[in-house]
Image (cartoon, rainbow, N blue to C red):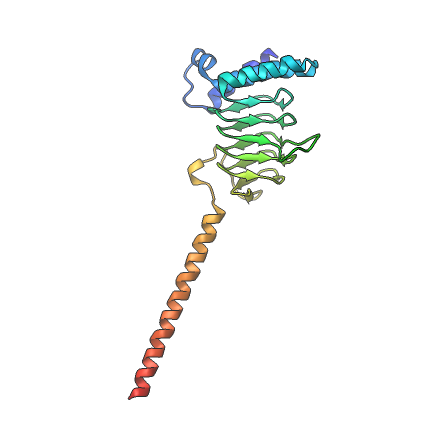
């Protein structure tokens, strides 16, 4: 356990350029506090001290704004950046080296029983405000764009954007390790641009036909 806690601390410096020293990170990083509280609550949960586990998780939620159910399974080097509004459900399973940002929900889709929350592979990044819902799997080394809503399985080495989420990059196309939130592919915007181009083309064709019609009328009048 001490090694895992040390890794949780070190990953902050790996992922957040604003982190300056250990003293500041330990005292002020709510994401780190939430993760450490969860590791303790999860220990109580596995020992079947369910009330103590839930109580600790709710105390952590009150102070950090991050809600992690004590039943969720979280791997090593998990990093929550900022963190306010993050929700992680009971049957979530999160791999190693996973990063999520504020406003992310790893939740269910209804009142189903059993495994009802997502499974995240290793080296997954989920950007701000994304919602990953249901008993689905996000493959290793995949990235979910900001504000996306993901309802289906995502293959390894994929980038997903949109509502509902769609895979826009996969094997064979280079994906930078650091996801640029301001430069995400947008399939909806691309489609709108394509439609705009087609409308402009049709307008030009109609204009050309009208000009030919006017020329034809002028010739017949002569």
Q: In the rendered view of the protein, which quadrant contains the N terminus?
A: top right
Taking depth in this image into account, of 158 and 52 the one nearest to the observer is 52
Q: Residue at x 54, y 16 (%)?
A: 60
Residue 187, given in percent of the width and then of the height, sits at 49, 48
Residue 24, given in percent of the width and then of the height, sits at 43, 13
Taking depth in this image into account, of 1 and 149 the one nearest to the observer is 149
Q: In the rendered view of the protein, which quadrant contains the C terminus?
A: bottom left
Residue 87, given in percent of the width and then of the height, sits at 55, 27
Q: Is residue 125 above or below residue 212?
A: above
Q: Is residue 1 left or right of residue 66?
A: right
* Residue 22, quarter of picture: top left
- Count of labels in the image: 0
Q: Residue at x 30, y 87 (%)?
A: 221
Q: Is residue 7 visible?
A: no
* Residue 40, quarter of picture: top right
Q: Is residue 2 visible?
A: yes
Q: Is residue 150 above or below residue 194?
A: above
Q: Is residue 83 left or right of residue 108?
A: left
Q: Residue at x 47, y 52 (%)?
A: 191
Taking depth in this image into account, of 210 and 96 the one nearest to the observer is 210
Farthest bottom residue in view: 222
Q: Residue at x 64, y 36 (%)?
A: 136
Q: Is residue 121 left or right of residue 188?
A: right
Farthest front residue in view: 111
Residue 93, given in percent of the width and then of the height, sits at 64, 27
């Amino acid at each position: 356990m001490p090694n895992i806690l040390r890794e949780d601390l070190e990953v902050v410096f790996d992922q957040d350029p604003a982190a300056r020293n250990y003293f500041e990170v330990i005292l002020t990083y709510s994401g780190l506090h939430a993760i450490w509280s969860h590791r303790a609550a999860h220990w109580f949960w596995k020992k079947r001290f369910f009330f103590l586990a839930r109580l600790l998780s709710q105390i952590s939620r009150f102070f950090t704004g991050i809600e992690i159910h004590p039943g969720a399974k979280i791997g090593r080097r998990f990093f929550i950046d900022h963190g306010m509004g993050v929700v992680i459900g009971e049957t979530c399973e999160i791999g190693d080296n996973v990063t999520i940002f504020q406003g992310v929900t790893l939740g269910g889709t209804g009142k189903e029983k059993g495994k009802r929350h997502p499974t995240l592979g290793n080296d997954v990044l989920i950007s701000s405000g994304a919602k990953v819902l249901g008993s689905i799997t996000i493959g290793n080394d995949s990235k979910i764009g900001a504000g996306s809503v993901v309802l289906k399985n995502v293959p390894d080495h994929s980038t997903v954007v949109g509502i509902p989420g769609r895979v826009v990059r996969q094997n064979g196309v280079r994906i930078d390790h650091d996801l640029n939130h301001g430069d995400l592919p947008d399939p909806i915007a691309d489609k709108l641009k394509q439609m705009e181009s087609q409308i402009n083309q049709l307008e030009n064709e109609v204009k050309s036909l009208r000009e030919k019609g006017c020329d034809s009328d002028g010739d017949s009048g002569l």
